[in-house]
Image (tube, rainbow, N blue to C red):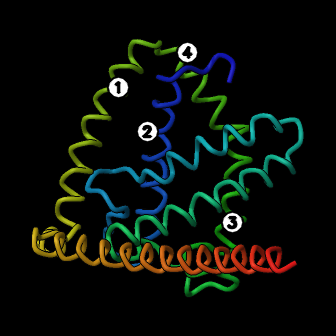
């Protein structure tokens, strides 16, 4: 996108993660009447909102002359992102991080019609208000400030992710599944399966070769008799 460079994208990504954390933490805290730190990480940021914000800008900015298409592009793009993010996180951490089961018109509790409509409304706010504001702010503070900010946030993110993954993933269970004995047994089973497949394949080739040889001999015998 013209005039927006990598450090600017990264800067906006981190801002979006923080805004998403404020939104979800506020809603959950009010609902439960106590402070609830939303998100899978320890810090005040939710990465899916960072990716969602960047997706909205990439998909919505080309249609900014038409609000309906901005709404539609953001709704579809962020719904797809939300679904696959939920799917991958459930596979990695073995638990569901958000659940729309209490809503109507949901799919596998990862996405819902209401959340998709909210993404569309958020797209209008992003394209017409927040993105121009962040773009102006980025130009005001300059590339150097954004680069230092991005580097600091990447370090914080990396440390947070490492500790979160280390704590969430059941490493003893994984190590037990990847013990040398189990790996050898798995390879042995694979070799046996491959051997059986090649054995069946070779037997089929030999049978076909024998049939062809018999057909040739039959044809030659017929020609000799004639």
| Number of other residues with Cα within 10 Å of mark 3, as a class: few under 14, some 14 to 19, many 20 or more | many
Residue tagged 2: 14
| Number of other residues with Cα within 10 Å of mark 1, as a class: few under 14, some 14 to 19, many 20 or more | some
Secondary structure at badge 2 equals helix
Q: Nearer the viewer, residue 193 or 78?
A: 193
Disc 2 from disc 3: Cα separation: 22 Å
Asked whether disc 2 touches disc 4, contact meaning CB atoms under 8 Å apart, the reply is no
Question: Which label is found at residue 102?
Answer: none
| Labels 2, 4: front one | 2
Q: Position of residue 90 (x, y in %)?
A: 41, 72
Asked whether disc 3 touches disc 1, contact meaning CB atoms under 8 Å apart, the reply is no
Left or right: where 143 falls relative to 163: right
Sequence-earlier tag: 1 or 2? 2
Left or right: where 134 falls relative to 91: right
Q: Nearer the viewer, residue 219 or 179?
A: 219
Residue tagged 3: 116
Residue tagged 4: 139
Asked whether disc 1 touches disc 2, contact meaning CB atoms under 8 Å apart, the reply is yes
Looking at the rendered image, the quarter that the C terminus falls into is bottom right
Residue tagged 1: 149
Residue shown at 85%/48% (left/top)? 69
Disc 2 from disc 4: Cα separation: 17 Å
Sequence-earlier tag: 2 or 3? 2
Q: Nearer the viewer, residue 140 or 198?
A: 198
């Amino acid at each position: 996108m013209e005039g927006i460079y990598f450090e600017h994208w990264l800067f906006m990504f981190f801002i979006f993660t923080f805004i998403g954390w404020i939104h979800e933490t506020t809603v959950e805290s009010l609902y439960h009447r106590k402070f609830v730190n939303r998100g899978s990480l320890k810090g005040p940021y939710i990465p899916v909102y960072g990716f969602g914000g960047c997706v909205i800008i990439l998909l919505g900015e080309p249609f900014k002359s038409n609000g309906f298409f901005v709404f539609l592009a953001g709704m579809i793009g962020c719904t797809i992102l939300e679904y696959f993010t939920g799917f991958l996180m459930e596979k990695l951490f073995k638990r569901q991080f958000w659940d729309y089961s209490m809503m109507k018109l949901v799919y596998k509790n990862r996405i819902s019609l209401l959340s998709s409509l909210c993404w569309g409304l958020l797209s209008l706010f992003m394209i017409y208000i927040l993105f121009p504001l962040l773009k102006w702010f980025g130009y005001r503070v300059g590339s150097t400030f954004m680069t230092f900010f991005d580097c600091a946030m990447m370090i914080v993110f990396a440390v947070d992710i490492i500790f979160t993954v280390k704590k969430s993933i059941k490493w003893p269970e994984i190590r037990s599944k990847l013990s040398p004995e189990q790996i050898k047994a798995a390879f042995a089973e694979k070799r046996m399966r491959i051997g059986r497949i090649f054995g069946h394949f070779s037997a089929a080739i030999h049978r076909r070769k024998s049939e062809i040889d018999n057909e040739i001999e039959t044809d030659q015998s017929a020609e000799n008799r004639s």
